[in-house]
Image (cartoon, rainbow, N blue to C red):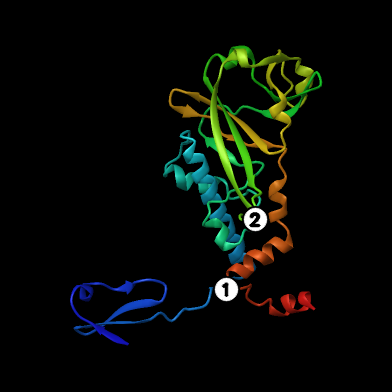
Amino acid sequence: MARVKGILEDLHGRLDDNITICHRGDKTFTRPAHIRQPHRLSRKQLLIRERQSHNNALWRALKESGHVYFEANKPAYNHFMAINMQSPVPYIPKQQFHSGNALLLPGMVLSDGPLTPISYQLDEVDGQPALLTDLTKKEAQKSTLLLYVLHQKVLTHQDWPDQFYLSIKVETLTTSDFTVVPPTLLTPYQSKSGTLALVGPRFADPMLGFGIVRLKDSHASRQRVVTRCTYYERYTTEEALQAAAKSYGGLTGEDFFLNSKSR
C-alpha cells in the first residue's frame, strides 16, 4: 500500500480497474483493487444484462436516425428500454458490445404515442413483395407518415469475424408512394375500402426490417418492426448463451454442466 500526498487527498474511489483510493483519518492511500476476476453471473442475471446491453445498442441505432418518438411521463430513453423488455434476448459476448453491435429483432417498438397504430405485414401484391397496410388513401393524407428502414449489416472481413451493426434510415411517405390493393389481401384488418401497400424488391430482402410511424400535432402512434430477418436467431441458442457467459467468467452454479459438456 502506498501513501499519497497532494492533489489525490480530496479524491476517493478507483483510479482504474486495478487501483483503489482510500482514506484513513487524515491520510490517503492507494491499493490494488480486490476484484481482479470477471464477475460471474447466474442465468437470470446474464439474461437481464444481455437484454439491457442489447436494448442500449438498439437505442443508439434509433437515436442516430434522428427520429425518436416516445411519449410518456419519463425520458424517451427510459420509456424505450421499458417498452422493449419483451423482445427476444440475444446473447452476445461482452467484448462485442464495446463495438456497438446490434441485431435486428422482430417486434422491436419503434415509437409510442396516443395516435391510432397502423397495422402492416410483409406479403405480396400481384407476385411482388410488399408491405401491406390498413391505411386508406384518405387516412394517409391526414397525417405525416414516416417509413423506417432497418438494415442488418454484417462485416465478413477476416480481421473482424462475427461483427455486425444496425443501420436505421427514415423516409417521409406520400400517397404516391403507395399502391392501392383490394381489401381481400388484408383479411386480418377487414378493411371496407381499398387500402395502401408499399411495393418493391426491398420488401423481400432478408436483412431489412420496416415500420411506418404516424405523426400528427406533435404526437405519434405506437409501431413495431416487421422483418424477414432471422440473423438474430444464431445468438439465441444455448451455445450463444454459454459463449456470452464465458466472457463474464462463466455462470454461477453450472461448473458441472460446463465440465460435462467438454468431455
Kindly state the secondary structure of the residue where label 1 is placed. loop
Of tags 2 and 1, which is closer to the observer? 2
Residue 147 in the image: above or below residue 206: above
Residue 34 in the image: above or below residue 133: below
| Residue nearer the viewer, 67 or 253 | 67
Q: Is residue 102 left or right of residue 21?
A: right
Q: Which mark is residue 161?
A: 2
Residue 20 in the image: above or below residue 83: below
How far from the left and from the top, in percent, is residue 255? 69, 79
Q: Residue sitting at 55 percent across and 56 percent down? A: 97
Q: Which mark is residue 133?
A: none
User: In the rendered image, which quarter contains the C terminus?
Assistant: bottom right
Q: How many marks?
A: 2
**10 Å neighbourhood of mark 2: few (<14), some, or many (≥20)?**
few
Q: Is residue 188 left or right of residue 33?
A: right
Asked if labels 1 and 2 touch by Cβ distance under 8 angstroms, the answer is no
In the rendered structure, which amino acid carries the disc numbered 2? Pro
How far from the left and from the top, in percent, is residue 189? 72, 24
**10 Å neighbourhood of mark 1: few (<14), some, or many (≥20)?**
some
| Residue nearer the viewer, 188 or 227 | 227
Residue 121 in the image: above or below residue 263: above
First in sequence: mark 2 vs mark 1: 1
How far from the left and from the top, in percent, is residue 245? 63, 67
In the rendered structure, which amino acid carries the disc numbered 1? Arg
How far from the left and from the top, in percent, is residue 1? 32, 87
Q: Residue sitting at 29 percent across and 86 percent down? A: 2
Q: Which mark is residue 40?
A: 1
